Image: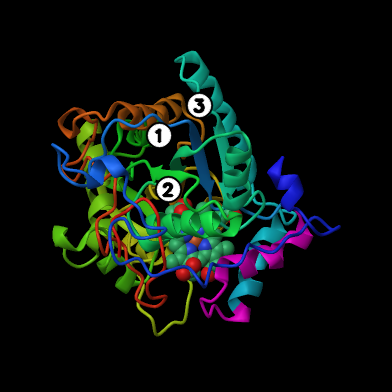
Amino acid sequence: MAADRLASTGDGFRPKPPRASAAPACTSIDGDGCRVPAATAAAAPGPAHVSQPTPYDGILLLGFGGPEGQEDVIPFLRNVTAGRGIPDERLEEVAHHYRHFGGVSPINEHNRELKAALDVELAARGIDLPVYWGNRNWMPYVADALQAAHDAGRTRLLAIATSAYSSYSSCRQYREDLADAVEATGLSGLVEIDKVRQFFDHPGFVTPFAEGVAAGLDALHADGFSDDEIEILFSTHSIPNSDADRSGPPERELGTGGAYVAQHTAVAEAIVARLGTDCAWQLVYQSRSGPPQVPWLEPDINDAMAELPARGRSAVLIVPLGFVSDHMEVLWDLDTEAMETAQELGLTAVRTPTPGTHPAYVTGLVDLVVERIEGTDPADRPHETALGPWYDVCRPGCCENKRLGFQPALAGVAP
Ligand SMILES: CC1=C(CCC(=O)O)c2cc3nc(cc4[nH]c(cc5[nH]c(cc1n2)c(C)c5CCC(=O)O)c(CCC(=O)O)c4C)C(CCC(=O)O)=C3C
Ligand SMILES: [Fe+2]
């Protein structure tokens, strides 16, 4: 396997492959390293961001990556924060979350399980597409997966990132990871990579949450709580306000908070509407980092909980709406910290499940692949909010990061 060939050190750690600094700037839609699919660039009947039917020959499953032992924790955190100016105190603080769980994030195991479930689902539907898994921040890296795909003769790949919403961290950075991987493997011109649309409002993603909220409310009702005593807190990763404002394509003009906030709000509304619950709800944020003077999305979930008793609430249903699996941000920031806060405040708290390998989620991800192979008309693409279905090919300026400046990215129209 390519992963073995690329592995170099005896202790099993390889630093993240360096970012391709010599990569050419992308100035046109067919500029080096920032292609849109040829069929899309050509006069296409649909909108420019909808791709044409494409005979993909492999799937790239893109993960965040996580440490798998105490000795991995600091090298992993250095990968995550490379070039971001995250202070050492914060690294130590976060390292402690991982150390508490033996230095192991469950996220890699989740992605192994997801890959296995996708393999089963693809086979059951007679779709002959191998899945190659690679991470942004830990082995196997995206470059390893890409190399493995190429070694197996695959040249036309469709990427699925384990991230549902639009923002720099959750969409564009994965597109940059793809560009970096093409550069690091020297496969420029030899492989072509697209990416499935952000799937925040795909029923495959929404259904597991809706089921979890329904079950959670049932449990709280069974414990004697009435609807006006319960508040539903939909929780997602905080990001800098400036990232949020720039999330999504500029021409959508989604206002303060951009596509990131609009998408989360719309999905929460869709879940509440689906269930017809009368409980109060709000969108809250967690896992903030960075210097205190830089504004990030608020309110923090713990601050939001502190307001609840005064409003007559005695129970909270915590919905990890921004996350696809029970990784560290869920295990620590919600199941440990937020649960402690609830206890201090005398609130009964229930945390609902993430999609994980829920059959609806796995089926939905394969549906997202099929719609790209078939080039399904957008009108026929499942979506549960008025914002979707989202873009196959990201628009110019989508999810820009002003701090980092322009970096080459695949699966979108440059810049
Ligand atoms: C939007 C978003 C998602 C959700 C979408 C998605 O899932 O992609 C997400 C997921 C995750 N974030 C994760 C871990 C970390 N995120 C960090 C830092 C940051 N995240 C950010 C945003 C997001 N992050 C941002 C704007 C930063 C600031 C620094 C920067 O600009 O990059 C740091 C550095 C230390 C710290 O500052 O906390 C760590 C360790 C893990 C792995 C958990 C595990 O190991 O189980 C996962 C799935
Ligand atoms: Fe994060």
What residue sits 40% from the left and 54% below the top?
410
Q: Taking 92 as reference, is 278 above or below it?
A: above
Q: Of helix, strand and loop, which one carries label 2?
A: loop
Among the two numbered marks 2 and 1 on one chain, the one whose residue lies closer to the N terminus: 2
Would you name the residue on which mark 2 appears?
Answer: 163
Would you name the residue on which mark 3 appears?
Answer: 129
Measured from the top left, where is residue 166 in percent x and y? 32, 54
Residue 88 is inside the magenta segment: yes
Among the two numbered marks 2 and 3 on one chain, the one whose residue lies closer to the N terminus: 3
Between residue 189 and residue 295, name the one nearer to us.
189
Marks 3 and 1, how far apart in space? 31 Å
What residue sits 50% from the left and 26% below the top?
129
Q: Nearer the viewer, mark 3 or mark 1?
A: 3
Residue 360 is inside the magenta segment: no
Specify start and end residues of the magenta stretch as a single range: 69-89
Marks 2 and 1, how far apart in space? 19 Å
Between residue 220 and residue 286, name the one nearer to us.
286
Whether residue 247 sits left or right of residue 305 in the image: it is left
